[in-house]
Image (tube, rainbow, N blue to C red):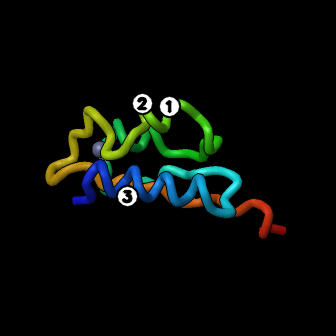
Amino acid sequence: MVSQAEHQASLEKIRNGLATKVRILIPADACPRCKAAEGAYALDDPRLDNELALPLEGCSRPGGCTAFYAPVLDRFGP
Ligand SMILES: [Zn+2]
């Protein structure tokens, strides 16, 4: 399981990179709490530092939360 510090470092890296947004990716075996958090968010969305900070608080998946941050690179898209 990825630690909170590792998630924060990953989010920080995305914020300082070329991404236009950050996406919370949810593996298929995630719990409903995590699935509700899936989506793309503005890089400065304060929820990313609060209720959407990973690992997600209230996650009920056995073995722990598997949600992770991924960069959204809109500017390279079609
Ligand atoms: Zn979960």
Looking at the rendered image, the quarter that the C terminus falls into is bottom right
What type is the residue that disc 2 sits on? Asn
Mark 2 to mark 1 CA distance (whole Å): 5 Å
Drawn side of residue 4 relative to residue 73, left or right: left
Q: Which residue is mark 1?
A: 47
* Up-down relation of residue 12 to residue 35 (above or below): below
Residue 76 pos. (x, y %): 78, 69
- Quadrant of residue 2 within the rendered picture: bottom left
Q: Which is closer to the viewer, label 1 or label 3? A: 1
Sequence-wise, which precedes: disc 1 or disc 3? 3
Q: Mark 2 falls on what kind of element? A: loop
Q: Residue at x 60, y 57 (%)?
A: 16
Q: Mark 1 falls on what kind of element? A: helix
Badge 3: residue crowd in 10 Å (few <14, some 14–19, many ≥20)? few
* Up-down relation of residue 3 to residue 50 (above or below): below
Drawn side of residue 68 relative to residue 75, left or right: left
Q: Which is closer to the viewer, label 3 or label 2? A: 2
